Image: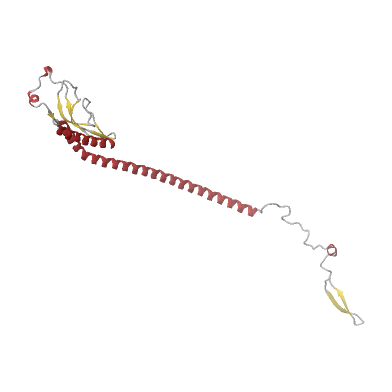
Amino acid sequence: MSGDFSMSGDSNGETNLEPTTQSVFDPNAEASGESPSEGAPSDNAGDSGLPPADEAGSGDRASQLEGQLAALRAEHEALNGQYMRLAADFDNFRKRQSRDSDDQRLQITCTTLGEILPVVDNFDRARQQLNPQHEEAQALHRSYQGLYKQLVDVFKQLGVSPMRVEGEAFDPSLHEAVLREPSDDHLDGVVMEELQRGYHLNGRVLRHALVKVSMGPGPAGGAAPEAQADAPGEQVG
């Protein structure tokens, strides 16, 4: 037990200790064992959840995360669009390269075959002019025909086919007119004769056919002008 004491003397010379002040503690409080601060109501008594300051911080954090998510989505869409465009460009490039390669291969084939076609023409002219009479000449002719047939078969395997132009209407995409003559047997603009055979290569013109084209029937009575009588064929430049 604590308190302030004073010293005083009596007539007998003895010193007595006497309390000068009252104890700061309430006797009732000491008896109950409670301090004055205990049992006071708390400001947070009965409150649940986060304090207002923490709730505001969580809302700001959620807004920040939503903004980051929206930015990432936009970036994803942009990158995905770039990827789709690059994929389409690469596919177009691959198709263009394949097409260019096919065109180049076809161009080389046409050039090579175009150099060989005059040899085929000479074979064909010689075949038409030969008329073997003796056994030895006939044997040579058969050998020649076998060689010509082998050459034609190779052309067929490569996709080369000859044009059939006589009696057909003149087509500048297939024919090249060398002569024009009047004719009672053919209408105007019809191919009368093939002067040099034309060829296709897989549906593409390998070489145009050189042809003679009809001008239609001549003047009435079949009398042709003197110029045409002297020169029956008109040269087409």
Q: How is the image coloured?
A: secondary structure
Residue 212 quadrant = top left
Q: Position of residue 5 (x, y in %)?
A: 84, 75
Closest to the observer: 134 or 52? Answer: 134
Q: Position of residue 205 (x, y in %)?
A: 25, 34
Is residue 222 rendered to the left or right of residue 206?
Answer: left
Label tally = 0
Is residue 140 rendered to the left or right of residue 55?
Answer: left
Residue 94 quadrant = top left
Q: Position of residue 42 (x, y in %)?
A: 74, 57
Visible residue check, residue 86:
yes
Q: Residue furthest right?
A: 12
Position of residue 144 relative to residue 42, above or below, is above
Is residue 226 rendered to the left or right of residue 163?
Answer: left
Visible residue check, residue 121:
no
Q: Residue furthest front?
A: 135
| Residue at the image point whose x is 23% and y is 39% from the top | 113
| Residue at the image point whose x is 58% and y is 50% from the top | 62
Q: Position of residue 232 (x, y in %)?
A: 10, 26
Closest to the observer: 47 or 98? Answer: 98
Q: Residue furthest top?
A: 221
- For the C terminus, which image quadrant? top left
Residue 129 quadrant = top left
Closest to the observer: 125 or 33? Answer: 125
Closest to the observer: 211 or 44? Answer: 211
Is residue 89 rendered to the left or right of residue 205?
Answer: right
Position of residue 72 relative to residue 19, above or below, is above
- For the N terminus, which image quadrant? bottom right
| Residue at the image point whose x is 31% and y is 41% from the top | 102
